[in-house]
Image: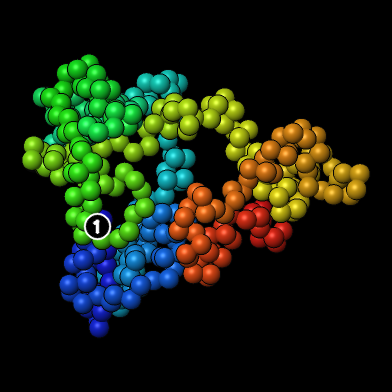
């Protein structure tokens, strides 16, 4: 569960929900930093919350509270932990064992447990692994009765038949979606600008009638091959990442030591390091990175933002000055 906390008049308040902190007296002043983050990322990342003075505990961190105050420390570092993992002679087997164990651990509970199954790569993998450790696993998905184009329930049902789970499909209508929208806003502690929020809310509500806990999958679609819209050429993943870095250097006109060392300065004396890089690739990368600020067509809320907020978002999406470029 998430841990939110605040300090008010010498009292330390903590809860798994922001509304509980407000009920205990936490401040209701909106945090302008969080507002800028929300319009940039479409959610408010930890440690900030929508209210000034209330915070979320970051993942991989622990908190010490005593009479001297509050102290937050990192106890787990993904980068450092990855250095301790021995190299595998059979990566495919190792990946399977790690994912299987991760799913097994999350099925340990003293209440009924199920799994969300959308029919996509990620939820299909998690649900299939869950059936190895949980007999008569209940899986849950939603469909759209009024819009067959967005209805993927048939894929979920096909996977459910293959893994032999007890599957439940909830068909949603436009009237139900519209009626539940207000209840969703009431249930949310903070704004969350993702179209999946409403159907996820309705799925969880209906799933609760059958099980108390449902495991979900977030991320494996990308790491398991992905879809066409999110899958780069795996063999060229390193090249893609390098191209993004080089494009940033090219756009802001700063020297790029890694390329300059190998190629030397250009005829004009420039050490941008872009020489030897195909012109069409330089042009394409320079044009596509960094991304441009939102437009009225893509984001109708953009012109309505206060100038200070628009400036912050635009700053993140515009070429940086040379001095601010990453080394």
Please name whichever residue, 122 or 204, is drawn nearer the observer in this view of the structure.
204
Where residue 224 sits: x, y (%)?
41, 27
Vertical order, 131 against 171 (above or below)? above
Please name whichever residue, 68 or 269, is drawn nearer the observer in this view of the structure.
269
Q: Quadrant of residue 281?
A: top right
Dot 1 crowding, Cα within 10 Å, few <14, some 14–19, many 20+: some
**Residue drawn where x is 17% and y is 18% of the image:** 164
Task: Please identify the residue farthest to the top as the structure is shown.
Answer: 162
Residue 247 shows in this picture: yes
Q: How is the image coloured?
A: rainbow
Where residue 165 sits: x, y (%)?
16, 23
At numbered mark 1, what does the secondary structure look like: helix, strand or loop?
Answer: helix
Q: Quadrant of residue 18?
A: bottom left
186 left or right of 51 in image: left
Circle 1 is placed at which residue position? 185
Task: Please identify the residue farthest to the right as the structure is shown.
Answer: 267
Task: Please identify the residue farthest to the bottom as the structure is shown.
Answer: 9
50 left or right of 90 in image: left
236 left or right of 13 in image: right
Residue 109 shows in this picture: no
**Residue drawn where x is 20% and y is 44% of the image:** 175
Vertical order, 292 against 199 (above or below)? below
Where residue 141 sits: x, y (%)?
21, 32
**Residue drawn where x is 57% and y is 59% of the image:** 314
Q: Quadrant of residue 209?
A: top left
**Residue drawn where x is 20% and y is 37% of the image:** 172
Vertical order, 8 against 199 (above or below)? below
Where residue 264 sits: x, y (%)?
84, 42
Please name whichever residue, 88 or 251, is drawn nearer the observer in this view of the structure.
251
């Amino acid at each position: 569960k998430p841990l939110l906390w605040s300090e008010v008049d010498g009292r330390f308040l903590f809860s798994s929900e922001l509304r509980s902190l407000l009920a205990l007296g936490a401040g209701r002043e909106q945090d302008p930093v969080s507002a800028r983050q929300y319009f940039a990322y479409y959610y408010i990342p930890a440690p900030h919350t929508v209210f000034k003075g209330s915070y979320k505990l970051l993942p991989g961190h622990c908190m010490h509270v005593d009479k001297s105050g509050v102290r937050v420390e990192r106890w787990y570092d993904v980068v450092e932990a990855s250095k301790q993992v021995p190299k595998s002679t059979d990566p495919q087997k190792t990946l399977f064992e790690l994912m299987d164990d991760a799913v097994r651990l999350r099925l340990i509970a003293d209440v009924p447990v199920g799994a969300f199954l959308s029919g996509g790569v990620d939820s299909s993998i998690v649900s299939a692994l869950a059936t190895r450790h949980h007999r008569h696993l209940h899986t849950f998905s939603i469909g759209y009765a009024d819009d067959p184009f967005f209805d993927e329930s048939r894929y979920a049902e096909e996977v459910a038949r293959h893994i032999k789970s007890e599957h439940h499909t909830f068909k949603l209508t436009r009237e139900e979606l519209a009626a539940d929208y207000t209840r969703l806003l009431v249930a949310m502690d903070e704004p969350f600008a993702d179209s999946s929020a409403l159907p996820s809310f309705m799925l969880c509500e209906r799933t609760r009638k059958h099980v108390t806990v449902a495991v979900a999958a977030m991320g494996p679609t990308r790491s398991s091959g992905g879809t066409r819209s999110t899958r780069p050429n795996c063999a060229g993943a390193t090249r893609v990442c390098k191209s993004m870095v080089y494009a940033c250097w090219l756009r802001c006109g700063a020297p790029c030591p890694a390329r300059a060392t190998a190629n030397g300065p250009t005829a004009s004396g420039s050490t941008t390091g872009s020489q030897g890089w195909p012109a069409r690739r330089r042009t394409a990368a320079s044009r596509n990175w960094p991304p441009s600020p939102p437009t009225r067509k893509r984001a109708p809320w953009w012109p309505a933002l206060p100038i200070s907020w628009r400036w912050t978002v635009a700053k993140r999406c515009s070429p940086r000055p040379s001095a601010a470029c990453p080394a």
